[in-house]
Image: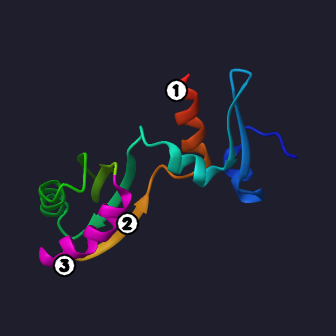
Amino acid sequence: VVSSHVLDEVSRIGSRVLVIAEGRLAASGEFQAIRELMDDRPRRIKVECDDPRQLAAAIVESGAALGVRLEAGGIVIDTDDIDLFGHQIAPLAAKAGLRLREVRPLDDDLESVFRYLVERR
């Protein structure tokens, strides 16, 4: 048993957690499974490619995103269907003639799960 507020270190030790917020048990289990159950929170994905604006337009048109935000070097996508997004991102980029440099989740770590649980209270 480890008690810590340094969540990055906790996630390296193990993936099964008890999250206590305001003195109450907020969640327990594998933190990835807890994140999967949070269907009220869209997944946030960072995508870097040759032409972020063009890819953003294609993603919005495809319906695979709830929202798209341009950022330096790429786009941040909010999606409530991570499977659909995962199946569509490479074909959309290929169809547009774009090269994907990076596709990575921004909120599937223990820190994000904890923050989402605390915000619910």
- Rounded to the nearest angstrom, the CA distance separating label 2 from label 3 is 14 Å
Q: Residue furthest right?
A: 1
Residue found at x 69% / y 21%? 22
Give coordinates of residue 49: x percent, y percent: 26, 68
The chosen color scheme is rainbow
- Rounded to the nearest angstrom, the CA distance separating label 3 from label 1 is 39 Å
Dot placed on the residue nearer the N-terminal end, 1 or 2? 2
Percent position (x, y) of residue 85? 30, 62
Is residue 24 found left or right of 108 in the rendered image? right
- Measured as percent of width and height from the top left, residue 97 is found at 14, 78
Number of the label disc, if any, that sits on residue 71: none
* 82 relative position to 112: left or right: left
Q: Residue 83: percent from the left, percent from the top?
A: 36, 63
User: Label 3, on which residue?
Assistant: 94
Looking at marks 3 and 1 on the same chain, the residue that comes earlier in the sequence is marked by: 3
Residues rendered magenta in the picture: 81-98
Query: What residue is rendered at 69% in x and 54% in y?
Result: 11
